[in-house]
Amino acid sequence: MAQCLRGKGGAAAVGEALRKVAPWRRAASASYHHTIQAVPRETAGPRAAARERRNGNVPAVLLTLAGPGPGEGVAHRKLLTTDKKQLAEMLKQSPYFLSTPVRLQVRAGERSTAVVHSGTVLPIKVQTDESTGNILNLVMVEADEGTMLKVNLPVVFKGEDVCPGLKKGGFLQKIRTSLVYLCPAEHIPPKIEVDLTNVDIGDRVLMQDIPVHPSLKLLSKNETMPVCKVLSSKPAE
């Protein structure tokens, strides 16, 4: 049952409760789902990571590339601690979390208001426990403007309801669920959309047929490989 706190004692209790809460949690904000909050982490290793998880946190690593181009290696790894509840909420809100650049704000400490680092990052790996679904680790890479990143982009099919081949009773065979592109950090799309509006039975959509921003480069040895086909019927199992 909710309790109404009145008078000086109630106000003091509320103030004390707020002081125990991290500053970024005290007020609801639209940035909650777009800015990962973190604090520096001094100790690496499985024991330190397990301790962080017991405290309701997720161990994280921020990678800094050696240069703006691809294949130049990692110049620096920064150990961080992130909040499990916030990450879980961000994953829930964004089905394309691993292909969407977000802001990162690193504070000096859990209850500190001093920001020691901020910038744009791309989450590239989230490790979860297979049995519980709990988030175990997060890996991010700095995604400053002009940085070229190799990104595994999910493929989404649209227009199935008006697809001529499907309206005739055809079957959509989805061959690729993702495609890898080299992208400037400022032009990373959350997903690759395949339009089925004009696809008939017997037609196929090739990798090279998918329109993307001109700055994106498809990383495939054979761009004529199909992403999907519309068959006359569902193949036998």
Image: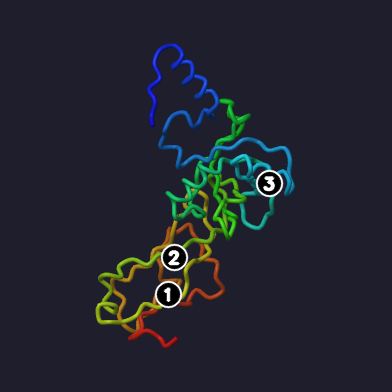
Give the distance between the C-alpha atoms of the residues marked 1 and 2, in whole angstroms.
10 Å
Q: Residue furthest bottom?
A: 236
Label 3 crowd bin: few (<14), some (14–19), many (20+), radius 10 Å: some
Colouring mode (rainbow / by chain / secondary structure / one colour): rainbow
Q: Residue furthest front?
A: 1
Residue at 66% x, 36% y is 40
Give the residue type that dot 2 points to.
Val
Give the distance between the C-alpha atoms of the residues marked 3 and 1, in whole angstroms.
39 Å
- Secondary element type, mark 3: helix
Name the spot of residue 96 as percent of width and height, x first: 46, 55
Residue under numbered circle 3: 50
On residue 155, the disc is 2
217 or 46, which is in the foreground? 46
Label 2 crowd bin: few (<14), some (14–19), many (20+), radius 10 Å: some
Name the spot of residue 102 as percent of width and height, x first: 50, 44
Give the residue type that dot 3 points to.
Ala
The mark closer to the camera, 2 or 3, is 3
Residue at 50% x, 66% y is 179
Give the residue type that dot 1 points to.
Lys
Left or right of 46 on screen, residue 194: left
Q: Earlier in the sequence, mark 3 or mark 1?
A: 3
Left or right of 102 on screen, residue 74: right
Residue under numbered circle 1: 174
